[in-house]
């Protein structure tokens, strides 16, 4: 099993203070945290160790399809931004979230159970600020929090033959890892994606980033769908997510409901360029 995906955070980032979240934002964040704590999986409980074991297997397969970029500074930067937004997660203390960059022109991001998060080089090339990166990584953290991928074990009836967590070993474990990896590449449901957009935007805003980072990134996906060079690298993302226009509308509606000021918070475009565009 590849172990190179476990990356240490050598870069420690500080987000310049932007004031404390408003009451409405705190209220939304509180309900997001309570909802995340309530997620349950299957007819028997899958504990933290088993979730991470499954997640490591899926992460190793993802990192086998596209290798992690051989650039420690870039991975450390992405890992640091991810860690900043993951601190909003109710699971932050129980999961060592890890973030890394996949070396492909494909424009996408993935999260496995247990907190392994990947963003592609192609997605980074489309971004223009740390706020956009934070929004995308926070969307992935939300998938982990809500156990969207792990839940597929129950939703798709993948646990036949297992009476308890202890049975998820050997062949059954390999089978679960294989099927969950397919889920990551073929996509979650529309509801799971819109929920992660919504939670991700709140996490990024509560971390001090501009709340519209995810929205501006999703708009770029839409603008590039017909781009002759980039369009083909968006095909998989397009097939596995709700339409960009629907995501933008839902995010803008939620930002208004939560009284998020799109102009507040940090964009950090210069810092993003310094770490990502330095080659
Ligand atoms: Zn997603």
Image: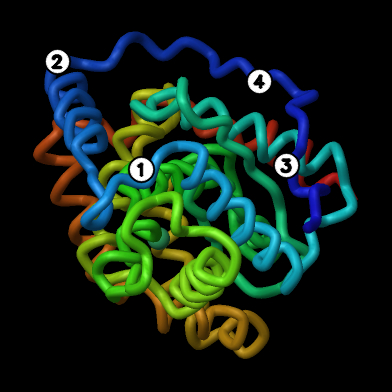
* Marked residue nearer the N-terminal end (3 or 1): 1
- Alpha carbon of mark 3 to alpha carbon of mark 1: how far? 22 Å
- Would the CB of label 3 be found within 8 Å of ligand 1? no
* SS for dot 2: helix
Residue that label 4 marks: 13
* SS for dot 4: loop
Q: Which mark is residue 141?
A: none
In the image, residue 194 sits, relative to residue 260, either above or below, namely below
Q: On the rendered structure, is 232 left or right of 252?
A: right
Residue that label 1 marks: 200
* Residue drawn at x 50%, y 69% as measured from the top left: 172
* SS for dot 3: helix
* Marked residue nearer the N-terminal end (3 or 4): 4
* SS for dot 1: helix
- Alpha carbon of mark 3 to alpha carbon of mark 4: how far? 15 Å
In the image, residue 240 sits, relative to residue 264, either above or below, namely below
* Marked residue nearer the N-terminal end (1 or 4): 4
* Marked residue nearer the N-terminal end (2 or 4): 4
One can see residue 244 in this view = no
- Alpha carbon of mark 2 to alpha carbon of mark 1: how far? 18 Å
One can see residue 140 in this view = yes
* Marked residue nearer the N-terminal end (3 or 2): 2
Residue that label 3 marks: 273
């Amino acid at each position: 099993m590849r172990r190179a995906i476990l990356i240490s955070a050598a870069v420690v980032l500080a987000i310049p203070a932007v004031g404390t979240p408003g009451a409405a934002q705190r209220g939304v964040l509180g309900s997001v945290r309570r909802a995340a704590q309530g997620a349950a999986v299957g007819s028997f409980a899958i504990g933290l160790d088993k979730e991470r074991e499954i997640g490591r297997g899926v992460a190793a397969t993802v990192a086998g399809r596209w290798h992690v970029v051989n650039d420690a500074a870039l991975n450390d930067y992405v890992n640091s931004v991810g860690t900043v937004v993951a601190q909003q997660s109710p699971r932050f203390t129980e999961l060592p979230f890890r973030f890394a960059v996949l070396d492909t022109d494909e424009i996408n991001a993935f999260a496995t159970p247990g907190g392994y998060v990947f963003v592609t080089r192609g997605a980074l090339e489309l971004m223009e600020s740390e706020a956009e990166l934070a929004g995308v990584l926070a969307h992935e953290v939300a998938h982990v929090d809500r156990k969207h991928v792990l839940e597929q074990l129950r939703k798709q009836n993948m646990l036949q033959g297992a009476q308890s967590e202890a049975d998820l070993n050997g062949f059954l474990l390999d089978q679960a890892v294989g099927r969950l990896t397919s889920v990551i590449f073929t996509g979650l449901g529309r509801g799971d994606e819109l929920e992660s957009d919504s939670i991700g935007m709140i996490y990024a805003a509560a971390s001090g980033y501009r709340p519209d980072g995810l929205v501006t990134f999703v708009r770029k996906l839409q603008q590039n769908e017909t781009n002759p060079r980039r369009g083909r690298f968006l095909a998989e993302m397009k097939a596995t997510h709700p339409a960009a226009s629907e995501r933008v509308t839902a995010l803008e509606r939620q930002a208004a409901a939560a009284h998020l000021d799109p102009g507040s918070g940090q964009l950090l475009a210069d810092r993003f360029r310094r770490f990502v565009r330095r080659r």
